[in-house]
Amino acid sequence: MNFASDNTAPMHPRILEAIGRANEGTAMPYGNDPLAARVEKRFAELFGRECAVFLVSTGTAANALSIAAACPPWGAVYCHPEAHVDDDECGAPEFYTGGAKLVGVDGRHGKLDAASLDEALGRAGKGTVHHVQPALLSLTNATEAGTVYAPAETAALAEVAHRHGLKVHVDGARFANALAHLGCTAADATWKAGVDILSFGATKNGCMAAEAIVVFDKTLAETLAFRRKRAGHLFSKMRFLAAQMDAYLEGGLWLELARHSNAMATRLAEGLQAIPGAALAHPVEANELFVELPEKAIAATEAAGYRSYRWNGPGTRLLRLVSAWSTKPEDVEGFVKTARSALA
Amino acid sequence: MNFASDNTAPMHPRILEAIGRANEGTAMPYGNDPLAARVEKRFAELFGRECAVFLVSTGTAANALSIAAACPPWGAVYCHPEAHVDDDECGAPEFYTGGAKLVGVDGRHGKLDAASLDEALGRAGKGTVHHVQPALLSLTNATEAGTVYAPAETAALAEVAHRHGLKVHVDGARFANALAHLGCTAADATWKAGVDILSFGATKNGCMAAEAIVVFDKTLAETLAFRRKRAGHLFSKMRFLAAQMDAYLEGGLWLELARHSNAMATRLAEGLQAIPGAALAHPVEANELFVELPEKAIAATEAAGYRSYRWNGPGTRLLRLVSAWSTKPEDVEGFVKTARSALA
Amino acid sequence: MNFASDNTAPMHPRILEAIGRANEGTAMPYGNDPLAARVEKRFAELFGRECAVFLVSTGTAANALSIAAACPPWGAVYCHPEAHVDDDECGAPEFYTGGAKLVGVDGRHGKLDAASLDEALGRAGKGTVHHVQPALLSLTNATEAGTVYAPAETAALAEVAHRHGLKVHVDGARFANALAHLGCTAADATWKAGVDILSFGATKNGCMAAEAIVVFDKTLAETLAFRRKRAGHLFSKMRFLAAQMDAYLEGGLWLELARHSNAMATRLAEGLQAIPGAALAHPVEANELFVELPEKAIAATEAAGYRSYRWNGPGTRLLRLVSAWSTKPEDVEGFVKTARSALA
Amino acid sequence: MNFASDNTAPMHPRILEAIGRANEGTAMPYGNDPLAARVEKRFAELFGRECAVFLVSTGTAANALSIAAACPPWGAVYCHPEAHVDDDECGAPEFYTGGAKLVGVDGRHGKLDAASLDEALGRAGKGTVHHVQPALLSLTNATEAGTVYAPAETAALAEVAHRHGLKVHVDGARFANALAHLGCTAADATWKAGVDILSFGATKNGCMAAEAIVVFDKTLAETLAFRRKRAGHLFSKMRFLAAQMDAYLEGGLWLELARHSNAMATRLAEGLQAIPGAALAHPVEANELFVELPEKAIAATEAAGYRSYRWNGPGTRLLRLVSAWSTKPEDVEGFVKTARSALA
């Protein structure tokens, strides 16, 4: 009954089992073990091409390392004003880059607007020493608003970015949810649409603590091994990160979990929309919904023990609700019913 | 049959079980869960006093964060020239501090010499803007040489450090092995001997990936929550870090494992010392030994599949051998026998 | 005939003479000379209180060092979106702080709005590890828009800042022009209004290259000597920085020059306002004006060799015109006449 | 009568005159003025080839920027343990690089030993993520010991460095003194001997505050304009830096001054060597000498008002004496006489 965040979910049993299976005998440390090699192969298959893979344990690490690999200390990272990298990582990108600047470019429903980006880059002072230098576009997919960039949208933004000499990063903390919604291939949603480097999330969607930096533009991979070690994100017992990611990808578990999670959010949205006075702030395309509800309805769910997030602070009526791989249909039904009953 | 490093060992079954037990239902993220609170309580009991605890997943993170908390960008960290923080972390302390300097002070068997430290600090230019400012003493216990600082030795160094205005950090990646050797309380070996902040290792000694920064000088704790988050080391599903540490501490498992590991190293040392031409480089007090062996003996163990580390590079005859909680007596016997037989 | 910037002006003859006078015999380096001591005394007199003074040679250095002294790496600096520290220093504050974030709070005519600041700080997430921590308010006086904060305006903003636990910095690259406009004491405009640290500019207003960091909150002074040295901003032959500042302050030269400069801007504004189609974007209170002019008028001044700055890029009609201590009345008259004639 | 440092000297009259001449009318800022262009041309002529030139005002800035341009955050800079960049800049290289490590390689008389360098680089762990990566060799010429690398010595070290993939920097705070001693061309002593980037000092040898970063390997120049600006070292009124350097180079003034300074040091050395109990610690090749003298002799010079530097702290008898362009023969004679008389 916890809709506060998908990171409140446990890990999926198959992830735990995989960790258990990996716990046999000794293994060479720091990624020099067979499981780590297998994970690299899995990613190559998934994306239909060679790519460099760096496993880490948190999304903040994946994002900050990716950004630092693509942006010099005097660089600027263009992102949505609500992007996690700008708002929720306590300045991790600034720390890892050595002081780059994040520049917000707005757009509806959590997505950057390509024309606004083009305009912002046009007046950014490229080549002028007085200004930080545009270096990277960072998109979040699925977005902070629970929406999803279609490949064509990503491609349009990447075209602008590349034309101005920027690289393209995707924060895919919820990449599984995005792809489950899109139904396209992982390649279509990323490198074929111009993405150069991807934070491929797994923690929120059923792993314990495992993320992958997937690098398509190999010039960006050169420094990452050193950056990861120096940041303390190179696990000695790497096999346990690898085991999680291996099981997560095996047999499409990751997409299966995301499909379930998305379906729960959709069902929740449908149920809540029927409530008088309810209003969705954004289309529900992944596993998050933002919905304005009558105070009575919110209070009732809270009293019943449902956890959610009043997005604009205590007393406000815009709720963020996040479903997870482990969300049960009965939790969704219960929430809707509780909210509805309060208004009867 | 892997003596290359204790990080090649699996996790102890009780750690894995604890992870499994923690995998029930939802839990509030980022350390706001009951297990995290329980771990803090365990540390308070273990050290017999209040202390701030920050869980992270790697030893490099624990060290770099601890050092950054105690040393400004223009500070200097005094350590042994062979210290892991100086030699094996790809400059993590420099990254986390924003460019501090590590200054080596030599001493026998991996231990800093208090008189040398006093002398070095005396001519360090404290207060002079041209010089980096002495800020922190960082000891490793057990040391890189497999030796252990007794409380009195730690206290003597800490006295010098404090007298010159430095704080004292202990890299305790193998703190369990040190304490198992000493037989004293954790308090005696740390804050009672003047230690201000401790990297309390667990990964090498039976955990999957879990370390704790234990802060005794509470002025050093103020910035750590922000530093950890910003470095990407705050786990969302913190319960799984906490579960490891909880089980590790419960019922003294950690010391039990370290005692076994130390015993294996001692037995290995005894066996190898009996070989003609063998010479130990350092006293064997924890779970590492450095032993010079005839090339024939080394080659025989390598051929038999035993992994070890030629400390000074390929072709050299000083071996580092590391035992772990999972090292079996028969592995030790086998290694000794193989080495001995080669010379027969 | 250069209205592009006040940094195109030469130094005032009395500054050059002072440099010449300082060039006698040997002097102890790094500020251990009598001139440096005299400058400190002058600042104490000027501000009517003790203050720590750090001389540097550029405004960017003065700002970046001041900001770093008051804002941790995970801190946030609140400033106007057009602030020089955010827009024109290539990320110097981010570099010097080790990755802090600059947060824009808008307001009319280049001045932050106190209510907006209060609101922004209220939702900044103080104490929450996921967010950078509000640490510093940085005002520019005179502003980038050529306006001036009155003491009461500064005090209102400082009150908000202090109430939320922030320190207050003023970028006074054109502090002389601000004070010349206000006619109050230097104390009234700064520490009596809540300013904790000031970048006191002199370069633009008649010096060669000299600025002072003036610290009122002495806790902010503790690290500055080390920060300045480490940044390469501690001059060995400090007497030549001190000589400039000494002559600049002596007998009120600085205010005399600023009054002239301001007067030239005012006269220019008056002359241009009379032109049909001209429109001032902001009140003209210091030595900068922003004026929209007919293209014909602009083109005529450019053709006649007057340098100015088309603020929104080539082809746009909002001009920034900056006067300096050395601007001559005939330059002003000539510019106005040329613009007017073009429309006749 | 100040032998404490060459930075106690005034500027040469021709430098002051040049500053005065530059103080005419307005000039475009930030190096977009004719003098800055002329200085670039002078350097091209001096070194007999194209080179990128970046003017700054302090030697620490020149060194730290040069090093940062050639060494990543996870890099290592190899230098002599007594190098100014390691010992006397409060960690400026670490700050500018974002946390690189300085590694000392010893050698006699302040010069690195090529064989020791080769050996150190051989065991540095190139390519291994656990270790900082060797990136740069930094030599000081003239050295901290007052000796001078001959072109062949520089070339031998550069050969080792380049073979291991490092770039080569020379800290030429006293490059004029080195070249005056060598009598070869500036090209012979630098790029023809393998130097990739040079801190070309002028402050100590007659300027007010002016240094040039001269870049021979143009890949190292790409980031320097941004790094300089971001560090606050791009002067707005650049013409005054350029004027100093222009006059310094014109007509060989710089070498003339250095020859005088060197001659004074040599004469001082000759005079002091004749004193019973005197012993030079290093050959005197530039403008510094290190001489052990009887305490009586030292005390007498101090009592007579001569300033010098007791190199190993108060009470020690190894004096550092530095001559400058402005040192007078009578000061030298007076010092020698005073010392000698004390022993009579």
Image: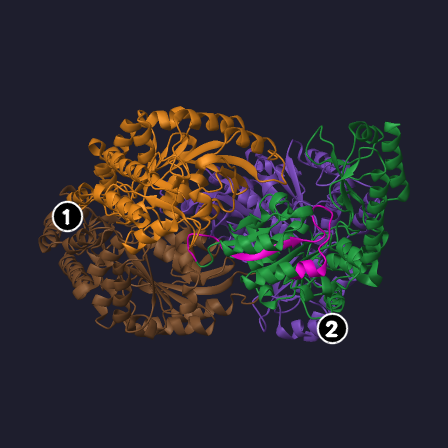
Chain colours: A brown, B orange, C purple, D green
Q: Answer whether residue D213 is visible to the viewer in this image.
A: no
Q: Which residues are magenta?
A: D128-155
> In the rendered image, which quarter contains the N terminus of chain C?
bottom right
Question: Does the magenta-highlighted stretch encompass residue D154?
Answer: yes
What amino acid is at disc 1?
A: Met
Q: Nearer the viewer, residue D339 or C133?
A: D339
Left or right: A103 as drawn, with respect to D105: left
Query: Judging from the image, what secondary structure is the residue with disc 2 in?
Result: loop
Mark 2 neighbour density, 10 Å: few (under 14) some (14–19) many (20 or more): some
Label 1 marks a residue whose chain is: A
> In the rendered image, which quarter contains the C terminus of chain C?
bottom right
- Percent position of residue A62, x then y: 35, 57
Question: Does the magenta-highlighted stretch encompass residue D103?
Answer: no
- Percent position of residue A255, x then y: 19, 64
Would you name the residue on which mark 1 appears? A1
Would you name the residue on which mark 2 appears? C304
- Percent position of residue D196, x then y: 63, 63
Query: Judging from the image, what secondary structure is the residue with disc 1 in?
Result: loop
Left or right: B10 as drawn, with respect to B309: left
